[in-house]
Image (tube, coloured by chain):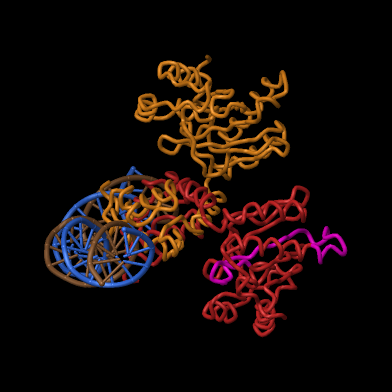
Chain colours: A orange, B red, C blue, D brown
Amino acid sequence: MPYTISAVDRALALLEALAENPGLSVTELAKVSGNTKSLVFRLIFTLEQRGYVIKDPATRTYTLGYRPLFLASSAQDNVALIKAAAPFLDDLARSSGQHVNLLVRDGVHSLCVALRTALDSGRLYAQVGRRGPLHAGGGPKILLAFAPREVRDEVLAGPLRAFTPNTITDPAELAARLAAIRETGRNESRGDLDVNAFSFASAIHDAEGEVIAAVSCAGRLDRLPAGSEPRLRDLVDEAASRISEAMGWRQRFNAAVG
Amino acid sequence: MPYTISAVDRALALLEALAENPGLSVTELAKVSGNTKSLVFRLIFTLEQRGYVIKDPATRTYTLGYRPLFLASSAQDNVALIKAAAPFLDDLARSSGQHVNLLVRDGVHSLCVALRTALDSGRLYAQVGRRGPLHAGGGPKILLAFAPREVRDEVLAGPLRAFTPNTITDPAELAARLAAIRETGRNESRGDLDVNAFSFASAIHDAEGEVIAAVSCAGRLDRLPAGSEPRLRDLVDEAASRISEAMGWRQRFNAAVG
DNA sequence: CCTCCCTGTTTCGCCAAGTGAAATCGCGTT
DNA sequence: AACGCGATTTCACTTGGCGAAACAGGGAGG
């Protein structure tokens, strides 16, 4: 906080509020973001000038603009993790024939930062930049398992939304699952985020041994070939190791045997 | 300018400078952006706190972070043009069997805001959020043709980079081409941006009749089936009309006959 | 091994610029 | 035609953004 420029911080917060609540007016944004109308008006004016938001003149309502697309494109091309992972994600998509996701944690959300889509599998919920929960899905639970205690506590305390009947909504059960994940660095889920989806995931480490991301192979549960599980598990784990190595991980920090 | 908050404006400018020059240090960023080291340090600190940039501790160097991906995802889902165009882009991709692009103008650049990729065609240069020139390519020249005079003058004055031997680099020739495009609202290019690429493009209008975007069908020149040109031209033009209508255009502002 | 130098980080004090409150404007409603 | 609501605009008050300059620390060169 000592060096934070509050005007900038408020502007970014407003941008995020708008991303989460598209189509709001000045007054509504002021309410949502907890700022005065004057301030919101000036912040959004500044953001609009630079193409970060677009005003619909008819409704005097705002949405994000085109400039974020440019930033995202640059981010995808230059962030070390995404660059390093790219070839291995390609390999994994090819060898597994399934959708492949690269996820990181963003606060109490999972965030998809790269994906490869399988040709045959149906329409996909995933999209680069899309946020999801941390307590459901193959990859997300890995991110949660290795998140700082504050984050884990917050998620375990908060309401655990049931996306499907299979979503773990009992904090104790979830905590046990996370402990198991910390032992193996792997996780798999079936129908806990989407009724008809499976996901095999493994943790990615950086040079310090910290878990910084998760790769997963995912697809429709009703199209998961019988007996293919061991192979998918191994392919994902192999990809995770390769990506970790590319990030400077040296296996020094092996997980204890489960 | 009256309502611009300069701290915010500077922060956004810095973010863009970083998008264009990934991997710079504080001092280098200060130089590139024309700010003092102190200011850059505080701005980037604020941006980093919110996940807009990531610091590589080893090199003390910065790149964009993950947060822009989230913003871009929201933008793609909520910007009126992109939402309205989506189904027609899908149709066009299916019926044409080619790559489909939706472009808008961002200053003196073209910006890809949506795309559909053909399965068979080779690797694609395009990516959502990627910027290109205005004076080369099928869609970009449409955007330039209908841009405000200042923009046209700036581009015509500036150096016209030759991406291939077919790129128009003579201002007079380009001006004539733009005039022709203003008559028809259509354009096509062959090998002027990429030696082995073609592009058929049409202008998209909004409710006020302004040209706000261009759709294009593009692919490898050596795979363009002989005699398919008229059909592609019509498919693209049809898609442009549909999207324009979805944006509230009512054909009142028909272009004069060429 | 020591020194210099370059770059990131921190401090300090001034005052421009960001801020909230309140007034004004403009439009759609009653 | 008056009303009401939300978007702009004005205004006066500091806050907090800012540049300059000091400090720190690590790597290159001697």
Q: Relative to B135, is B71 above or below?
A: above
| In magenta segment, residue A145 | no
Q: Relative to A144, is B55 above or below?
A: below
- Depth order, front residue of A42/B190: A42
Residue D30 appears left or right of B211 = left
- Depth order, front residue of B10/B31: B10
The residue shown at (72%, 81%) is B258
The residue shown at (65%, 82%) is B175
What is the quadrant of the N terminus of chain B in the image? bottom left
Residue farthest toward the top in the current orientation of the protein:
A258
* Residue A162 visible to an observer of this rendering: yes
Indicate the position of residue A240 as horizontal and vertical percent values. Answer: 59, 31
Q: Relative to B71, is A147 above or below?
A: above
- Depth order, front residue of B12/B231: B231
**What span is colored magenta in the figure?**
B204-231
* Residue B10 visible to an observer of this rendering: no
| In magenta segment, residue B216 | yes
Residue farthest toward the right in the current orientation of the protein:
B226
Indicate the position of residue B208 as horizontal and vertical percent values. Answer: 54, 71
